[in-house]
Amino acid sequence: MKTSSPSTVCVLLYVFLSSLSVVTICGNLLVLISIIYFKQLHTPTNSLILSLAVADLLVGVVVFPFSMKFSVSSCLYSQHLFCKVRQTIDVTLSTASILNLGCISIDRYYAVCHPLTYRTKINVHVVVIMILVSWSVPVVVAIGFIMAGLKHEKCEQMCFLDILLANIFGQIFSFYLPVILMLCIYLKILLVAQRQVHSIQGTKSGATASKMERKATKTLAIVMGVFLMCWSPFFLCISFQLLNDVSVPAAVIESLNWFALSNSMLNPFIYAFFYSWFRSAFRMIISRKIFQGDFSNTKLH
């Protein structure tokens, strides 16, 4: 059911949400152009970051406009066709973004914990498989939601259990399993990084080693902290609603959904702005220097 809102509130919401969309699109476009244009960035790791940027860019281009329309008109639970389309696209692209984050964590695990075999373990074929999985699983999950919804419309309350199971398994594969995987991987990376720092303390000053350890800890805290901060409230709220059969106000779910989607806006800052070569690439793109000649072989610092 749609509800009317004061025009001032609507305008402010549109301005705020449109700003989020613009920042998300621009940030991920910078990542895409940088990786595609500069040959130095043509690596397996950056291929995964490219896939993540595509998912986040589509969130900004497709999901944000749909969500703006429905957040302001409050039709979260409407059975209108556009509301169903919005939910399907939202689930697909958000899950793709989460799974790409998981693949990046696997790549970092081998780079830090098994540096000698990294290039043989994470090759082009493995990266392609990771990307395909990151996009095929969300499509399967979205199809499951659609099929469960169609079945529910035909048999109504007799299909409640099927709907419940579809939602539970969808959340498990879309969020909880990737989160557990990433937590375990980054914990392992942190432990290995700390051991590496301690092992080289004999050749470097204690202050330098301590700085490296703090930097590694801070980086992993930012990666997982921002991800969990954005996504956990939404999925925990949905899980609580499903398992306890309670009704959560639409405004609460919409707010948590937007908070979760903001992760797509923050990813470029976390996975790209953190690295100096990406910052150099962004400066060249923003200053339009790449249009003044062929700088694809430029050494980025």
Image (cartoon, rainbow, N blue to C red):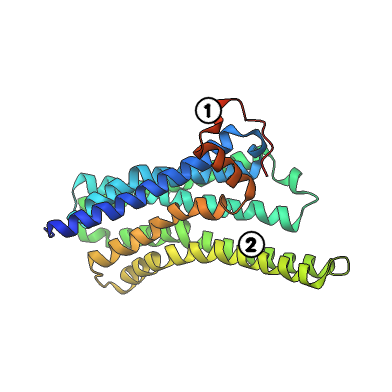
Residue indicated by mark 1: 291
Towards the viewer: 106 or 112: 112
Amino acid identity at mark 2: Ile
Looking at the image, residue 56 sits to the left or right of residue 146; the answer is right
Q: Residue at x 56, y 49 (%)?
A: 272
Q: Secondary structure at mark 1?
A: helix
Q: Quadrant of the N terminus?
A: bottom left
Please determine whether, in this image, residue 151 is positioned above or below residue 230: above
x%, y% of residue 19?
Answer: 33, 51
The answer to whether residue 191 shows anywhere in this view is no
Q: Earlier in the sequence, mark 1 or mark 2?
A: 2
Q: Residue furthest right?
A: 202
Q: Which mark is residue 3?
A: none
Q: Which mark is residue 185?
A: 2
x%, y% of residue 115?
Answer: 77, 52
Q: Residue at x 43, y 63 (%)?
A: 230
Q: Secondary structure at mark 2?
A: helix
Amino acid identity at mark 1: Phe
Q: Residue furthest top?
A: 293
Q: Residue at x 37, y 61 (%)?
A: 259
